[in-house]
Amino acid sequence: MEVLSLISQTILIIIFAPLVSGIITKIKNNLRFRRGPSIFQPYYNLAKYFSKEAIISDSASWIFKATPYIVFASTVTAVMIIPVFIGGGITQYIGDFIAVIFLLALGRFFLALAGLDPATTFGGMGSSREMFISSFVEPVAIMAIFAAALTVGTTNLTALYGIGTMTTSLILAAASIFLITLAETARIPIDNQETHLELTMVHEAMVLEYGGRSLALLELAAYVKQLLFFIMISLFILPGFGGLLFLIAKILVLAIVVAFTEVSIAKMRLFRVVDFMFFAGILAILALIAIVLGV
Amino acid sequence: MEYQTLLEKIQNKHPSILVGANENCDDEIYIKSTPEKFNELCLALHEELHSPVMSMFAQDLESHFRVYCSFLGIKYKKWFFVTMDIAKDTPQFKSIAKEIYSANLFDREIKELFGIEPLGNPDTRRLRLHDEVWPNGFFPLRKNFVPPKETGTLGEYKFTKVEGDGIFEVPVGPVHAGIIGPGHFRFSVAGEPIINLEIRLGFTHRGIEKLMEGKTVEEALQISECVSGDASFAHSWALCHAIEKIYGLKIPERASYIRAILLELERMYNHVSDIGGIATDVGFSHPSALASIIKELIHQLNIQLTGHRFLKGVNMIGGVTKDIDENKKALLLNVLPIILRDFNELKQILSSSTSFLDRVDTTGMLKKKTAEDFGVLGVAGRASGIAIDLRKNAHPAYVGVDFSPQTAETGDVLARLNIRIQEFEQSANLIQKILGKMTPQSINEKSFSFKEGFALGYVEGWRGPVLYWININKERKIERCKIVDPSFRNWQGLSYAVIENIIPDFPLCNKSFNLSYAGTDL
């Protein structure tokens, strides 16, 4: 029974993940005096990609072909580990939050290799930048999650549902994870999903050579990863309110905040990302200090 | 100041250098020189006038070639042309690019179009007639030119090589994402920082100067509107200006004012579009959406005033075809405050955003010395401290309007942005002032008599000076038309401005120059 509900929960997340992006895009466009595409546009895009054949460079190796599957599979496995609305249960036997970070790192590793693989102008640039950014993102993410883990006393965050009230450390950890989310989901100020300028791209540059079903899987994995981070933040904020309706409400609020953030600031200079992640790191450290001080 | 004193001064410094000077059409001085004295004279003028080579071109005169090199004398309100004749059996001259670097591109242009060899210039690669498609030995602007039957020999264009540990070459283009022209950018990078950038253009070469030959002035006018679509009014005005000078035609003041108003509208829609473009390129999408709204408002204003969003079909020899009557004047006076109000909001958003200012400040610095050496003019030049604006310095249409060119010193993206912001507001202001000066009058002078001759037409377009040197022959056709769009030399400024910047900042630097591919490729 638990296995069935876990599977159905995962499938639901995969189904609804593109919608979150659709909603963010819609809000952003409305903020910019535009009508914008329908919130279901990500689904139309996926349907289009799935029905197209993929053209693969002659110089690409197996890594290029395998990467979309690895990225998609590792992201979906990560989703299975985090507690969503089925608290507790069998998820705790698969792995804990550290496993989530490592699974996402696995996907990123292969994506960076795939960016280099066809030896095109922009792919390598994207891979190098992604690795540069992730070398700051990963340690900060682990610190922020440790702060949450220390709060509940275990790295299995299902235990968060046991906490009725919010603590200072959880709020700070959530803020830190929010900044990481912006970096991980290729959003302004770190990256820009909407740009056509290859020279400025990070994530988009790595997937530039992909088309057809491979691209569809990578895009879907990116949507799922975004929703995963949103759920993670939702867990940290008001963890006592864990029901499905509360989760949806929290995700919608996050979507609005992300949309406002993206419209109201400019993208950073590439090397400024260090300062940005440094700030996220300080938030995570403050979360740890808050635990030690017991506030 | 009288230009004769200048010539005397040069004569005293360099005895026996001047061969003879002729005035032409009020503000042009032609100094006849010889291949031996040409370089010395050009250098003397360049130093005295502090002017880059504004235009340098050749003409096939059946018995020989004639090369012209022109300088702008701001103090004297005159254009100085130095000419020399080159025998056809020895088509070569001593390059002056070593002394005056802003002549370099013109050297290359003369070589590929006329087959006249600039001796001593180390860089004589082709600009537009690419080796890959254009065979050797065909020089399109010679009068006896016959188009080649076969395409080229698949020669190779040699880019400058930068070598060393960790230096990579990044080729970008010629096909780019988005709706822009084609150009190949070859970066040499050490990681993200750019060590060298070489730009190869010419992919949209349409042979406009050849196309102009043998056309009537009316046909030429239509072609000029298509040279660079976003500056079609500046280009057609420059052409009309040249022809009106040749005909000795005094156009009605009202026509001059209408032209000035429309030129300022063209400047406004392009400047606001670039300001929005700069915001887009740093992912700052809210102000860029606002900029598009303002741009659209101006386009709609254009269509209501002239029937064309890009102001085509308005200029004619002798004036303009569309009047700005009382209704249209009222419309302009109503819409301009709305545009300025929105623009002010845009300005506020940009200037109060630290994340935006951090991106544009100190990015893509073009030093004044570099800009001067390359002959960078217009918006990019003024942002680096070169205070040349033909509206102030030379153009009759702006006489009597209080106006001073906007300049900045830093030469970075922020400076070019600020110049655009200031010029936008200044243009709106100018339009209001000019509207106040208009008196009921005819808008074009239809009675004029044909004359043969040559003259330079010039207009300060929104990018910078647009120059048309035109020669009309006895058959009332265009004999030679030399077009210089400011983009032609400003591209070199871009390739130096990006050095030491990182690759992801290149699109931003590029947008802050926003140069025309079509205007360069001709």
Image (tube, coloured by chain):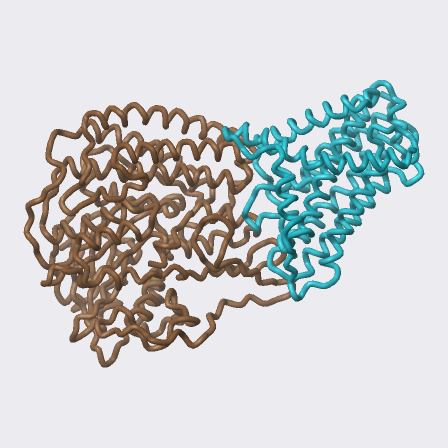
Chain colours: A cyan, B brown
Residue B10 is situated, as x and y percent measured from the top left of the image, at 20, 60
Task: Name the outermost residue toward the bottom.
Answer: B89
Q: Residue drawn at (60%, 59%), measured in percent from left and top?
A: A121
Relative to the observer, which residue lies in front, A245 or A115?
A245
Question: Quick check: can you spot residue B44?
Answer: no
Q: Residue drawn at (20%, 60%), measured in percent from left and top?
A: B81
Relative to the observer, which residue lies in front, B142 or B48?
B142
Side of B463 relative to A65 (left or right): left
Task: Name the outermost residue toward the top.
Answer: A165
Side of B158 relative to B62 (left or right): right
Relative to the observer, which residue lies in front, B116 or A285?
B116
Quarter holding residue A79: top right
Question: Quick check: can you spot residue A102?
Answer: yes
Residue A199 is situated, as x and y percent measured from the top left of the image, at 57, 51
| Relative vertical location of residue B509 with respect to residue B423 in this rendering, above or below | below
Task: Name the outermost residue toward the front.
Answer: A51
Q: For the C terminus of chain B, which image quadrant?
A: bottom left
Relative to the observer, which residue lies in front, B93 or B459?
B459
Q: Residue drawn at (27%, 25%), measured in percent from left and top?
A: B331
Total of numbered circles in the picture?
A: 0
Quarter holding residue A170: top right
| Relative vertical location of residue B506 with respect to residue B154 in this rendering, above or below | above
Residue B396 is situated, as x and y percent measured from the top left of the image, at 18, 42
Residue B462 is situated, as x and y percent measured from the top left of the image, at 33, 43
